[in-house]
Image (cartoon, helix red, strand yellow):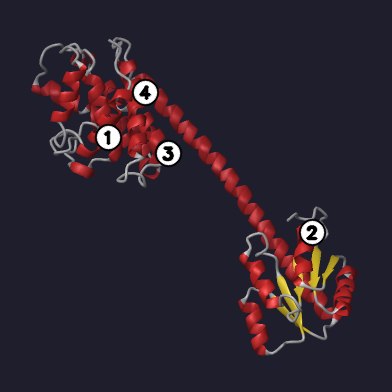
Amino acid sequence: MEQKKDKTPAILIVDDVEVNARLLKKMVEKIGYIGITATGVNEAVKLMEQTMPQLILLDIVMPDINGYQFCELLKNNPLTRDIPVIFVSAANELNDRMKAFNLGAVDFISKPFDYGEVVMRVNTHLKMYRMQRELEDSKRRLSIIVGEQANKFEEEQKRLLKALAKLSERENDTGMADHLENVSYNARLLTQALNFTDKYENDISKSFIEAVELAGMVHDIGKLKVPKEILEKPEKLTPVEWEIIKHHTDGGYDIIKAAYPDIDNNPFIKLAADVVRSHHENWDGSGYPDGFQGERIPLSARIVKIVDVYDSILSARCYRKAYTREEAEQYMKNGSGKKFDPYILDIFFKIEKQLRKPSQ
């Protein structure tokens, strides 16, 4: 069906009595509208394929399909359900009127009809129809604008998180940049894999996946608050030094919160901040900084923890050599149900060959 391009409203008149149809046509044309007549529903449908009316004047009693049935068909069709229907009929008992209104008609004009009444009713409902369409158009335009602004806002969030990630790539730590990129890439891959499981298919959106990916880049941002000599110390850390290291989690959270004070009302940034704070929590509750256990640990943090630990142990550090792939896999398996969420770890092993590995 095509909408008539002429801005003058078209009114479809459906009446099997041709004299009534012609009379109504003259009335609507006299007040400046386009009148289109049909003597039955089948003819009316064909006319509507050529010109979509802005209002329909409809008789009840007709030879093929009666007006009630036609009105019901119109209201069940998304393309025509908003077109106002005014019944024009000699069947004007209360039951007739009630049935018409229950089927979605906006008004009822009794035959014999009066010119003044027809003009008033037609003008009123056309005005209301135009206002409704204008309101819907405004809502659509507003929705587009809001969507565009939301996309721009999200892109700004991503850029800031990426900028924060760059800060955590210390110049004297040549492996940090590769580690962050690997964690980011692998976190996205693992999250996408979880999206195809029965347990998490309704919990993971496109935005969630993107946020986890960016969180992988900033998960260690709190190490900016840790002295370089502690980070690079090859010997065993003292209890005090270990406490300082542990506070890189809540310290990183504070950095994110300083950049986004309204963090609780910003789901995208909140997810990244959850990863920063909780990626050292353990499934059995023995981690830090909050000692969260099981599914109380944010899903995003449980995902990043697995790929973070895996990439870390495959890389050489100043205080230990790199694990072999076999050693790393055994370490991860030993941590199932202790350090790591066992369900997510199972999915991790199914995609492990696809993950990025540190360059040796």
Q: Where residue 286 sits: x, y (%)?
A: 12, 35
Q: Are marks 1 and 2 in contact (CB under 8 Å)?
A: no
> Label 1 vs label 3: CA separation?
21 Å
Position of 206 compared to 173: left or right? right
Q: Specify few, some or many for label 2: CA neighbours under 10 Å numbering under 14, 14-19, or 20 or more.
A: some
> Label 1 vs label 4: CA separation?
27 Å
Front disc: 1 or 4? 1
> Label 1 vs label 2: CA separation?
57 Å
Residue under numbered circle 3: 207
Classify 78 as above or below 209: below
Dot 2: what SS? loop
Q: Where residue 110 sits: x, y (%)?
A: 77, 84
Mark 3: amino acid: Ser
> Label 3 vs label 4: CA separation?
19 Å
Work out whether residue 310 or residue 255 is closer to the camera in this orientation and state it: 310
Q: Which numbered disc, 1 or 3, marks the residue that appears first in the sequence?
A: 3
Mark 1: amino acid: Ile
Q: Are marks 1 and 4 in contact (CB under 8 Å)?
A: no
Residue drawn where x is 76% and y is 68% of the image: 42
> Label 3 vs label 2: CA separation?
43 Å
Q: Where residue 303 sits: x, y (%)?
A: 28, 34
Mark 2: amino acid: Thr
Position of 45 compared to 152: left or right? right
Badge count: 4
Residue under numbered circle 1: 347
Work out whether residue 15 or residue 63 is closer to the camera in this orientation and state it: 63
